[in-house]
Amino acid sequence: ILREEDGYVKVSMRSLGKFPVNELCHNHFGGGGHLNAAGGEFEGTMEEAVALFRSLLQTNKDLYL
């Protein structure tokens, strides 16, 4: 889930299995959490946050395929 706030985008991720959303949130969104539930924030627009998220899925697809 990506939710736009005042000047930033709030990021909340959930996954199944071994896909490490906590690592993605820690490394790219200044946050963290558990393997299958994590969150963080993105300084920028919603469009930029979506573009980053899509690129992360592409570059990390070996983790969830």
Image (tube, rainbow, N blue to C red):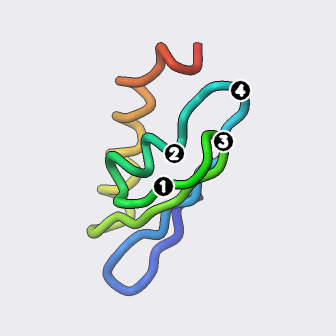
Which residue in the structure is indicated by mark 2? 22
Which residue in the structure is indicated by mark 3? 36
Q: How far apart are marks 3 and 1 (CA)?
A: 10 Å
Mark 3–mark 1 CB contact (< 8 Å): no
Label at residue 17: 4
Q: Which of marks 1 and 4 is nearer the N terminus?
A: 4
Label at residue 4: none
Q: What residue type is labelled 4?
A: Gly
Mark 3–mark 4 CB contact (< 8 Å): yes
Q: Quadrant of residue 57?
A: top left
Q: How far apart are marks 4 and 2 (CA)?
A: 13 Å
Mark 1–mark 2 CB contact (< 8 Å): yes
Q: Which residue lies furthest to the bottom in this view?
A: 6
Q: Earlier in the sequence, mark 1 or mark 2?
A: 2
Task: Please tell me which residue lies in front, 31 or 52.
Answer: 31
Q: Distance between the residues labelled 2 and 3?
A: 7 Å
Q: How far apart are marks 3 and 4 (CA)?
A: 7 Å
Q: Quadrant of residue 33?
A: bottom right
